[in-house]
Image: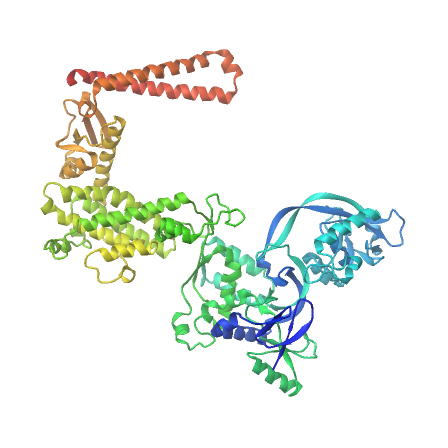
Amino acid sequence: MSSQTEFGNGKRSMVEPSQIRLGDLVLPVIGVENASPLMNRAVIEAFVRLHEKGLIYQGSYMVNWSPSLQTAVSDLEVEYSEESGALYYIKYRVAGGSSSDYLTIATTRPETLFGDVAIAVHPKDDRYSKYIGMMAIVPMTYGRHVPIISDRQVDKDFGTGVLKISPGHDHNDYLLARKLGLPILNIMNKDGTLNEVAGLFCGLDRFEARKKLWADLEETGLAVKKEPHTLRVPRSQRGGEIIEPLISKQWFVSMETLAEKALRVIEKGELTIIPERFEKIYNHWLSNIKDWCISRQLWWGHRIPVWYIVGKDCEEEYIVARSSDEALEKARAKFGKDVEIYQDPDVLDTWFSSALWPFSTLGWPDVSAEDFKRFYPTTMLETGHDILFFWVARMVMMGIEFTGTIPFSYVYLHGLIRDSQGRKMSKTLGNVIDPIDTIKEFGTDALRFSIALGTAGQDLNLSTERLASNKAFTNKLWNAGKFVLQNLPDQNDATWESILAYKFDMEESLIALPLPECWVVSKLHLLIDMVTSSYEKFFFGDVGRETYDFFWGDFADWYIEASKARLYHSGGDSVAPVAQAVLLYVFENILKLLHPFMPFVTEELWQALPQRKEAIMVSPWPQTSLPRHANSIKKFENLQALTRAIRNARAEYSVEPGKRISASIVASEEVIQYISKEKEVLALLSRLDVQNVQFTNSPPGDAEQSVHLVAGEGLEAYLPLADMIDISAEVERLSKRLSKMQTEYDGLKARLSSPNFVEKAPADVVRGVREKAAEAEEKIILTKNRLALLKSTTPITN
């Protein structure tokens, strides 16, 4: 059996069903149906079932036409952009009237006047009411007449208040013409050139015709004026060309009943869209949905399973079948054994097959297939917010229609990846970030982590700074792993028995830990609960940020440093196991929490840890609701505040990093009791001379010659100045600095004392000088106080 295929020139030629003709060449079809018989079977079945229910129909309607691709495109595949254009004012003479009887029409597309079928004015527009019911002469058409009618849809304030109705080339005109019963006139070929209806302009490209027509109108005196105008231009997502509204015979899916079911699952709470604000957008689109044009005039795709009868009207006689054999059998039953048939050359919109994806990939229409029974429906779909309509809504509609069940319970919509300036990536702008190159430079885990930190539904600006930061985070994780491994004993070491004896899931065991260990384990248990809750709520960005902050801010910056007091200092052999046990326990749980974000580095580190029996991917998720000790967290926060205060003082006085200084810690007996137990940790973190750290409940005798620090309520420190700096040199330095500051301050005050300056200078300039003077005065006071303290300390130093 042979078939016939239609081409752009309107001719048909005999080719085999699996072939297409391109010029003089006959080529094999390499389409989706050849590549995936299972998928093609599902697509054909879906088409047939929808057609049998009356939900698929064929008709000539207005579509979005791509002249260069010569195919219809979906409404969703048309992007509108604000572009500079022109508004053309043209005279339409009134038939039977004098030379002064004419209507001026403003249009952005003068070439469509060849398709005019009426002129419309508002019924209450006094300027034109006398012409209603008369005829107008369409310019450049050899005197073709069209009626002048009234309609309330005409905007009296746009242009001249007169509307030309060209229903073959404008969506609004098309709807108006159908309402009023006006004829539809097509003036354009499929390639964007004007057809024979345009007379002498036949064969010209639509934009060339516009230029020539305007020149001819000017020559004949029918052109009134041309003025700049901002247009909302429809462009094809595929090729970027301007879309042409065109009447074309296509296949459509009736969407109303399908959309109603998809709306209902949202109302009942059976489907949840994350973030929630997109539910309103989903509902609005489905509530205002139009029938879906599913046929495409392309060389690839799932071919429409419709066959026509040779010699019969295509719209009246056609056969929908699951195969060519079935189609031929049906045709013979109806038209006799000598009947010839040919398949529709069009293919289906790619989103038609994509809408079936959740179940067609699992064996549907064979509902007994093991994959279908096991995996359908699934729990979650994760996709971009830009295809909520293209794909998500259609999957929901088709899933309900063909399986009776929604394909998923949750839809998680991520944002789009944009460049560092928030611009959409494009080759034209040269801002495309190649993921392969990015992975080579920053690593896969850093790229994944950077992208996953985005908030649901919000676009993410991806910059090299962000990637570099998360590469540093990956390196920090790797180095922390090296530290943990280097400080664990060999697997055959007897110490392992002591390490493994520590249990962290019992409150009594947790409280028995030293303060830094109890703090970090308690913080970990809080983190596990927060992260688990965020994962369950699909707050993936929060998971990444919370885990990042704990690992870097608590574990790496504080506990790893504190653990060195156990591992490397006095009593190391007796206290090391508790630090080793906590390091291992906390680090392995951090790896588990980060694994979904950073699978490669976490798996590598996990496998390197001793006594791993399985991959991290299949290891149990950390247990939730584990004990935590709030009092220990508060106590260690006091120790942190004290450490920060001492570090800040060292920085302020430019104490050499390697220099150990003395300190007197003043606090209540209760605070001294737990702070003094961690004397070595405090000394290590603050770079204190551990032999000269004193704990007392009252200020020391040299308090007047010390830097006084208040770390918190009931917790203070005194740092002897003589221990920290060369006082004589610092007095000399500060004296010079004070002299310079005083000179600058006096200059500012002199300007403010001048009436000419205050009255004549701009207010913001005067305000700026006053602010500088106040700031300088504050610095002078602080420097004087510092000098007074240093000078009072000089005799002791001597």
Q: Is residue 631 visible?
A: no
Quadrant into which the N terminus falls: bottom right
User: Residue 650: horizontal and vertical position, in percent?
Assistant: 24, 29
100 displayed left or right of 406: right
**Number of numbered discs present?**
0
767 displayed left or right of 226: left
User: Residue 370: horizontal and vertical position, in percent?
Assistant: 39, 75
Residue in view at x 71 percent, y 57 percent: 173
Residue in view at x 73 percent, y 61 percent: 177
109 displayed left or right of 127: left
Task: Give whichever of 493, 516 is nearer the camera.
Answer: 493
Residue in view at x 57 percent, y 60 percent: 287
User: Residue 597: horizontal and vertical position, in percent?
Assistant: 35, 54
**How did the renderer colour the structure?**
rainbow
Task: Give whichever of 551, 27 is nearer the camera.
Answer: 27
Up/down of 165 relative to 758, above or below: below
Q: Is residue 437 visible?
A: yes
Up/down of 781 relative to 45, above or below: above
Q: Quadrant of residue 414?
A: bottom left
Quadrant into which the C terminus falls: top left
Residue in view at x 68 percent, y 76 percent: 316
Outermost residue on the bottom side: it is 337
419 displayed left or right of 560: right
